[in-house]
Image (cartoon, grey):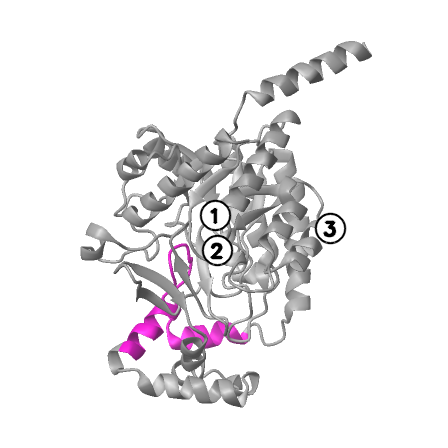
Amino acid sequence: MGKLLILKNLMKFRLVDTYNPKMRQTMRWYGPSDPVTLLDIKQSGAKGVVTALHNVPNGEVWKISEILERKKIIEDHGLTWDVVESLPVHEKIKTKSENFLELIGNYKISMSNLAKCNINTVCYNFMPVLDWTRTKLNMISEDGSCALEFNFNALRAFDLFILKRENAKKEYSKADVKNATDYFKSLSGSERTELRENIIKGLPGCENTYNLKSLKKILNNYRKIDSIQLRKNLISFLNAVVDHAKSLNILMCIHPDDPPFPIFGLPRVASNLDDFDHIFKNVPYINNGLTFCTGSLASIFKNDLTNIFEKFSDRIHFLHLRNVKKYENGDFFETNHLEGDVDMHDIISKILREQKKRYIQDRKDFSIPMRPDHGHQMLDDLNKPTVNPGYSAIGRLKGLAEIRGLELGILKNM
């Protein structure tokens, strides 16, 4: 019996030697109103779609009928719905206030309904109030394409002189305040309006939009919630839902904070290796996993992406591949996918080795869904309205093509 098992394993290894598992190539789609159509996505070469029911208000149950309707639209185009991004966590759950238990109940029902529709990977985030934040959505790159940018002076100028958040000045150094003041004075009226709109209206994937009054009000909900308390609230949420996810064979994957540092006095709890270590030690089920977003994680010098990937590789359930370039002061902008601070060759090599390991282990999730995250607005897309910044078609098509080529080259040499 022992010899048969050894022989079986040897045969399996030989099969694996001739098998090159690829990442599951997907593209994000914002539903029927997205100007990037499912036909566009199919022509890009992607096989799957990452989407959500953005029409359902945050906290309400996703009904089976609505999930199936959206799924059918996708499958009618020869694609599959591979990942939910996102099933949003309501602010009352994050603050553990009012009817948060009812909202967790709704979340679990939505998870059950997704599982009944054979959709089993759920991306979510635990960022307070604002989803991913940028200060400029149309930074002109050297080649004339438009990129997304984060500028500290712009953020502080918004905080101090547009939002006028109470006691905000106390959180910044004198030098920071002076630089923000000079920056704000340099802006024209239209540039100040643009900065305000970029931040308070939210970006693609955000479930809420605000005006200045409502943003101030919801920020006040976090006056007594620091990173320690928010960590506890996250673990409490996970303890309430991960057992359920396990029973449904759903893989949950938290998206890193973007950017991975506090803004507007809000705490962050999913920004670095220590954060993820805390999350996974406290809720160790493999169903409690990570969305490995290279761009978010690479936005601060502290993060070693290789170290983070290797430490949590077995519970990475979803991949966002994009690149950033950081300045010495911490500002950053989004570059083309194979440029910038992320060594994409190294990361994809590690992904492919992890997938091979999973295949040997008989894991069904050996092919990790990946999407080219963001992309420059370029070529014909420069003449089109920016509906979803970062999500125009051609820039992401270029990113997917580059990643696909790099992946093929690596596989040929493995």
- Furthest residue toward right: 2
Question: Distance between the Cα atoms at labels 2 and 3?
Answer: 24 Å
Q: Secondary structure at mark 3?
A: helix
Asked whether disc 2 touches disc 1, contact meaning CB atoms under 8 Å apart, the reply is yes
Q: Which quadrant would residue 301 be assigned to in this image?
A: bottom right
The residue shown at (61%, 47%) is 309
Q: Quadrant of the N terminus?
A: top right
Asked whether disc 3 touches disc 1, contact meaning CB atoms under 8 Å apart, the reply is no
Q: Is residue 287 visible?
A: no
Question: Distance between the Cα atoms at labels 2 and 1?
Answer: 8 Å
**Sequence-first disc among 3 and 1:** 3
Query: Is residue 277 depicted above or below 403 in this figure?
Result: below
Is the residue marked by circle 2 packed among few (<14), some (14-19), or many (20+) residues within 10 Å? many
Residue at which label 1 appears: 320
* Left or right: where 13 falls relative to 200: right
Q: Is residue 103 visible?
A: yes
Residue toward you, 371 or 398 = 398
Residue 12 x/y as whole percent: 64, 18
Query: Is residue 150 depicted above or below 167 in this figure?
Result: above
Magenta span covers which residues? Answer: 191-220
* Left or right: where 171 falls relative to 276: left
The numbered dot on residue 281 is 3
The residue shown at (52%, 47%) is 123
In this view, the mark in front (2 or 3): 2
Residue at which label 2 appears: 295
